Image: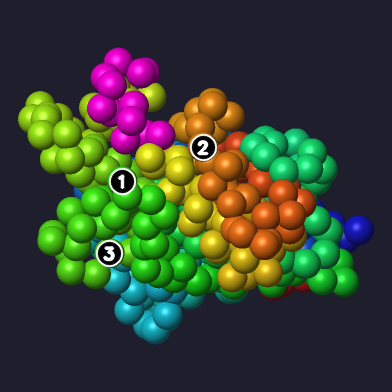
Amino acid sequence: MGDMSEIVAADIGGTHARFAIAGIDDRRVVSLGETFTFSTADHADFEAAWEAFGQALGRALPDRAGIAVAGAPEGDRLKLTNNPWVIHPGRFGERLGLASYRLVNDFGAVGHAVAQLDETWFRHLCGPERPLPAEGVISIVGPGTGLGVGQLVRRGGGYLVVETEGGHSDFAPLDSVEDGLLAHLRRRYGRVSVERIASGPGLPSIHEALAARDGETIPEQSERELWRAAMAGEDRLASAALERFFLSLGAIAGDIALTQGAAGVVIAGGLGLRLADHFAGSGFRERFVAKGRFAGRMKAIPVKLITYPEPGLFGAAAAFAERYR
């Protein structure tokens, strides 16, 4: 073991920027301090939020940082998803006083969190009740505003996180209800990706398609209101849409596991934790394993839900720790 050192961990999303001080030692995160959250609308740019964090903390900030961003962390001018800020990594030295940093995509950060978090932060969903494998591939599937898909490869005590765009693969219907759902969405979007169904905005789409099939009119309601009604079981059609959401998420997660050669699967994303208590009673597992001749293989894969409250922030720190000794 070396000496613990401090870095800044930052997770920059569409509406919020989160900061904390992380302790790292021997290429791992050993502590994560209190989280400070700032609205991106209230701060002119990343540098302004960084300064606000330093002021809130009342101390000089470390000169090393792990930073997760909503978007591709490439080039010298980063445009973020749903966020007006433009980030210029080339100015981090002069503007933020950083000697070294690591930038990762927000879902890549979740991959680093999965790699380094203690197994107590993973809730068992289905498959054999054993920890995630110490060797091999772990698929990470994160329904939220979109569908994040990543891959964690563990080998010889080390690991590699692979960021993917698996959420944009084509949606494959598995029964006549989903044939109708695909037709409904194709009229609107042309091409229909799995993200159109297995995400926050996916539930209203499923709900509309079911209503159209049944010739029902549905009240005007926000996505948030629909999710609340569906999870509370207050509305028959909303509950039916939620069940369809779980069936599709199970099928999609199973496809991703097959495609990536996974020995374990982790469900993450903004929706994952909110839906924690609904997996057991849903058709998620049934669809996850329903892969014909490969059903036996699918049943042998442990599927977990990450329960850590700030995986992006932890993962930003973990990404830095993994690269810099």
Dot 3: element: loop
In screen coordinates, is 145 left or right of 254?
left
Residue behind mark 3: 192
Q: Indicate the amino acid at tag 2.
A: Gly
Q: Indicate the amino acid at tag 3.
A: Val
Residue behind mark 2: 283
Dot 1: element: helix
- Report the predominant secondary structure element of the magenta stretch: helix
Residue behind mark 1: 177
- The quarter of the image holding the N terminus is bottom right
- Packing grade of label 2 (10 A; few <14, some 14-19, many >=20) is some
Dot 2: element: loop
Q: Inspect the magenta stretch and tell me whether residue 57 lies in it.
A: no
Q: Residue at x 59, y 41 (%)?
A: 285
Residues at marks 1 and 2, CA–CA distance in whole angstroms: 15 Å
Q: Residue at x 62, y 50 (%)?
A: 289
Camera-side residue: 214 or 106? Answer: 214
What range is drawn magenta here?
232-243
In screen coordinates, is 323 left or right of 277?
right
Camera-side residue: 67 or 49? Answer: 67
- The quarter of the image holding the C terminus is bottom right
Q: Nearer the viewer, mark 2 or mark 3?
A: 2
